[in-house]
């Protein structure tokens, strides 16, 4: 089902910090985004699945890295990526973290489209990133073929 271009961008926001959740929700709603907020990874996963199965999926998920329940942001991202693996336009995901400097995980290995540190520049960076992902959603890359071994290796194998 193709989304109506006039429909607002739907965002699923998840953070176990109640004050941060309310503040980010208000900021995003002030930018005219439709925001559903949850306070645990488990609730977010259930909301994501229900919306996807109802045909009203989320365009963007914004998840905190460290949450108090049994599911952190990386596990939520992994589940979302597995769930929408065949979608022509995958769900865009932003990972928020206060631990950006010492996570030890390169941004490219989080599964998120963007990682935003929780600092004094978070709000403008979040608005800019959401706007960018909403306007220019990433397309799935075609699978890469398995590289062929160099000719010298192939010749020695046939000998």
Image: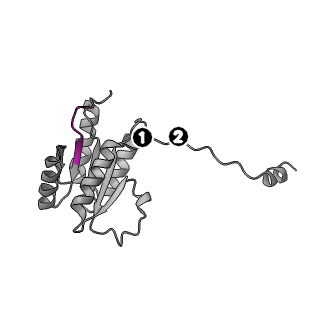
The reply, left or right, for residue 148 in relation to residue 55 is: right
Please tell me how crowded label 1 is: few (under 14), some (14-19), or many (20+) other residues with Cα within 10 Å.
Answer: few
Residue at the image point whose x is 38% and y is 46% from the top = 81
Residue 3 in the image: x percent, y percent?
29, 30
Q: Nearer the viewer, residue 147 or 2?
A: 2
Q: Which residues are magenta?
A: 6-12
Residue 149 in the image: x percent, y percent?
73, 51
Q: Quadrant of the N terminus?
A: top left
Residue that extends furthest to the right in the rendered view of this protein? 159
- Residue 76 seen in the current view: no
Q: Is residue 21 above or below residue 57?
A: below
Q: Marks 1/2: CA distance?
A: 12 Å
The residue to which callout 2 is attached is 142
Please tell me how crowded label 2 is: few (under 14), some (14-19), or many (20+) other residues with Cα within 10 Å.
Answer: few
Question: Is 3 within the magenta?
Answer: no
The reply, left or right, for residue 141 in relation to residue 4 is: right
The residue to which callout 1 is attached is 85
């Amino acid at each position: 089902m193709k989304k109506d271009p006039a429909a607002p961008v739907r965002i699923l926001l998840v953070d176990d910090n109640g004050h941060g959740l309310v503040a980010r929700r208000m900021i995003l709603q002030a930018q005219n985004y439709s925001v559903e907020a949850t306070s645990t990874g488990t609730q977010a996963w259930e909301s994501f699945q229900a919306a996807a199965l109802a045909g009203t999926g989320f365009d963007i998920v914004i998840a905190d890295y460290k949450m108090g329940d049994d599911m952190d942001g990386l596990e939520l991202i992994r589940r979302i990526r597995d769930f929408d693996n065949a979608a022509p336009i995958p769900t865009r995901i932003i990972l928020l973290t206060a631990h950006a400097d010492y996570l030890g995980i390169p941004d490219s290995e989080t599964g998120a489209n963007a990682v935003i540190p929780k600092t004094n520049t978070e709000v403008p960076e979040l608005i800019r990133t959401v706007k960018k992902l909403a306007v220019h959603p990433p397309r799935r890359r075609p699978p890469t073929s398995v590289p062929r071994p160099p000719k010298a290796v192939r010749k020695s194998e046939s000998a």
